[in-house]
Amino acid sequence: MALELAHETIWFDKWRVDDAERQFYENKSSSEGSGLGSVASQIAKARQEIKNSLVSVSHTGSSTGGQPSSDVLNRLTKLESENSTLSKTVSTLEKLIVQLTKRLEALDCGGKTTSAPCTKSDPVEEDDDDDDVDLFGSDDEEEDADAARVREERLKAYADKKTKKPGPIAKSSVLLDCKPWDDETDMSVMEAEIRKIHMDGLKWGAAKLQPLAFGIMKLSILCTVEDEKVSIDDLTEKIQENEEYVQSVDIAAFNKC
């Protein structure tokens, strides 16, 4: 029997394990209880501090007698003054807006030249203080339709005159060689006949006799012409009309002035 029991696996020390487990849980429960106690004490302390602060505030209010401080009174006085100033400014602006609306309506009606009547907008309530502020002057200073028409005509005439203002006149300097028929032609008479030609924009200059060939002299005469008024072809034709003295005319030089 004893031999059989020796071969059995029996936990003879289980009571030791049970005691150790019981002691562990007892210690754990005691530590948790002490932690809750510390939290409760902290909450009670916070409540006491709040009560003390409320008591101090009530004592301070009772000592001042419930009267506001001088700083608060000064701020209230300043705010009331600013409010009054703003009210006056808004009132002045409203009057100016009413006056401006009336003047714009008057200008809109007076500036129309058509026969259609000017439609009036809803009447605006007048204020006795509007006479003190005159933004656009009196009604007598407004120009009527005739004055506006005369002004427009003058401006148009001035613009047309300015656009038609002449610029620099284009001129040319021309040297003409006038050849006679033979050496018996009187060159002085030929020059005189040529200078009798008058055209608007033509001005004769110096003249000089130069040898041509076989004792024949040619007349080189200078003239200045305005390009828009005088044609060189017309001038040469007029010179060649003196068939008694002039055989031909050549352009020796042509320069712009």
Image: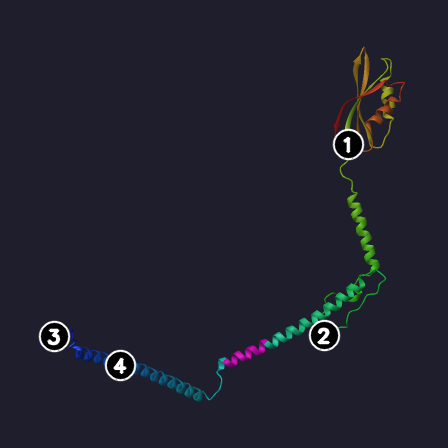
Residue under the point 22% across and 80% down: 22
Q: Whole-Å distance between the Cαs marked 2 and 4?
A: 91 Å
Q: Position of residue 108 (x, y in %)?
A: 78, 63
Of the numbered discs 1 and 3, the one sitting upstream in the chain is 3
> Mark 4: which secondary structure?
helix
Principal secondary structure, stretch drawn in magenta: helix
* Residue wearing tag 1: 171
The three-letter amino acid code for the residue at tag 2 is Asp
* Residue wearing tag 3: 4
Residue closest to the far top = 214
Q: 62 or 230: nearer the eye?
A: 62
Q: Position of residue 67 (x, y in %)?
A: 49, 86
Above or below, comparing residue 57 to residue 236 in the picture: below
Q: Which residues are magenta?
A: 72-82
**Dot 2, crowdedness within 10 Å: few (<14), some or many (≥20)?**
few
Marks 2 and 1: CB-CB under 8 Å? no
Of the numbered discs 3 and 4, the one sitting upstream in the chain is 3
Q: Quadrant of the N terminus?
A: bottom left
**Label 1 vs label 3, nearer the camera:** 3
Q: Whole-Å distance between the Cαs marked 2 and 1?
A: 71 Å
**Label 2 vs label 4, nearer the camera:** 4
Marks 1 and 4: CB-CB under 8 Å? no
Q: Whole-Å distance between the Cαs marked 1 and 3?
A: 157 Å
> Mark 2: which secondary structure?
helix
**Label 1 vs label 4, nearer the camera:** 4
